[in-house]
Image (cartoon, rainbow, N blue to C red):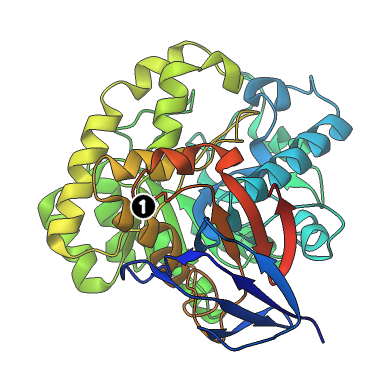
Amino acid sequence: MKRCQVVGATVVDGSGRDPVAVDISIEDGLITQVGASGAHGERLDAGGLTMTPGLIDAHVHLGLSSPIQPQFSFRISAAEIAADIFATAGATLDAGFTTVRDTGGVDGGLVTTIAKGKVRGPRVLSCGPVQCQIGGHGYYGADWEPTELWNSHHLPGLCALSMMSGNADELRRNVREAFRRGASFLKLCVTGGVVGAHDRLTDTQFTVEEIAVAVQEATARGTYVTVHAHNNDGIRNAVEAGVRCVEHGTDLDESTAALMATRGVALVPTFAVVEQLLHDTVGAGLDESTRDRVLGVRERMTEALAAAKEAGVRIGLGSDLIGPAQNRRGEELRLRAQLETPMEALVAATRTNAEILGLSGQVGVIAPGAQADLVLWNGNPVEDPELFADPANAVLVLKAGRVVKDLR
């Protein structure tokens, strides 16, 4: 029976309450007590450090850890793609993220390999391949590559970015296939995207009736649908169809935000990827033309965040980083702290994200009964959110009570 205590830290528990100096008792991977309890197994000295719950990124793409265009033009070997994915998984943990929601790109084999402890990485919830409309966002084949050849880019058990559907029946078949491969929720692309060659941000994709088919299939399995959506028409289509979450939400307006709040639909803005593509498009393995598609997105997404907050929408946090440069995942908290308070950014990345992922009370909080996912920071990131952005500041990371990083 593994018991330990983390002593001497200032604790920010993920609830939004003020920090407090208390010791944390852990047994068999779970938090058993918050507060002094005397001798309790091994003692981890965290004096002078600030403790937060393990961070949660609700929008990651572990399967897109190689340069994008080379990965989808057979210029990188399967072995190198796997090595890049494993490196990103480890870097995610080192940045203080102990749980992630992969919103397209990994297959079930990676999720189970990390869960077995064979590869360092966070707890992963995955949608498997993204569900996309033929010719829509999520297709990265060459211009003249026939759609039916797209699945040849999948590496079974490792990564599979997307599946193409031409109608509702094909979509139903594909979402069932995604569940067979281990998906725990579904993601659809219902608008064009920033990183895409075959669509525009103003495009809507899939009809309300088609989106509803995926919702029906997810509901039958006790889970939900989230959608990639930038323009307001696509967002509204998805909300009308019954989805539970919207990713990006760039052009969300006040009336659609109010509808989301009424129906309990969450929003996950993604600012870090916008900064990434504005400053290092080539580093992600994409054409410079991608930068033109990004211009103005940050400002409009900021306005959408404000509209969602005003309407009372539950707002999570996701980085959406792509390509090899995914080691500074905490940039998303730093950027959000510029738009909200640092405490609000932390709560979004912990308690709120746990609620969105369906893990409320299990992760994202420091409370009895929760997983002992803990990060000890060199300094107080609620006072200085710049600390979130540098993985070196996460000096001690515990995942389910096990030390997975220790720089003390």
Residue 166 seen in the figure: no
Q: Which residue appears farthest toward the top when viewing the image? A: 288
Residue lying at 72% horizontally and 26% vertically, measured from the top left: 71
Q: Quadrant of residue 401?
A: bottom right
Looking at the picture, how far across and down is residue 93, in whole percent? 66, 51
Q: Quadrant of residue 26?
A: bottom right
Residue lying at 53% horizontally and 39% vertically, measured from the top left: 134
Residue 148 seen in the figure: yes
Decide if residue 54 is on the left or right side of residue 75: left
Looking at the picture, how far across and down is residue 364, in whole percent? 49, 68
SS at badge 1:
loop
Q: Is residue 292 above or below residue 255?
A: above
Looking at the picture, how far across and down is residue 368, in whole percent? 53, 86
Q: How many marks?
A: 1
Decide if residue 251 is on the left or right side of residue 337: left
Residue lying at 29% horizontally and 51% vertically, measured from the top left: 235
Residue lying at 71% horizontally and 73% vertically, measured from the top left: 43
Camera-side residue of 308 and 152: 308
Q: Is residue 89 above or below residue 217?
A: above
Residue under label 1: 382
Looking at the picture, how far across and down is residue 169, in whole percent? 55, 60
- Residue type pointed to by label 1: Val
Camera-side residue of 200 and 288: 288
Q: Is residue 193 above or below residue 108?
A: above
The N terminus: image quadrant: bottom right
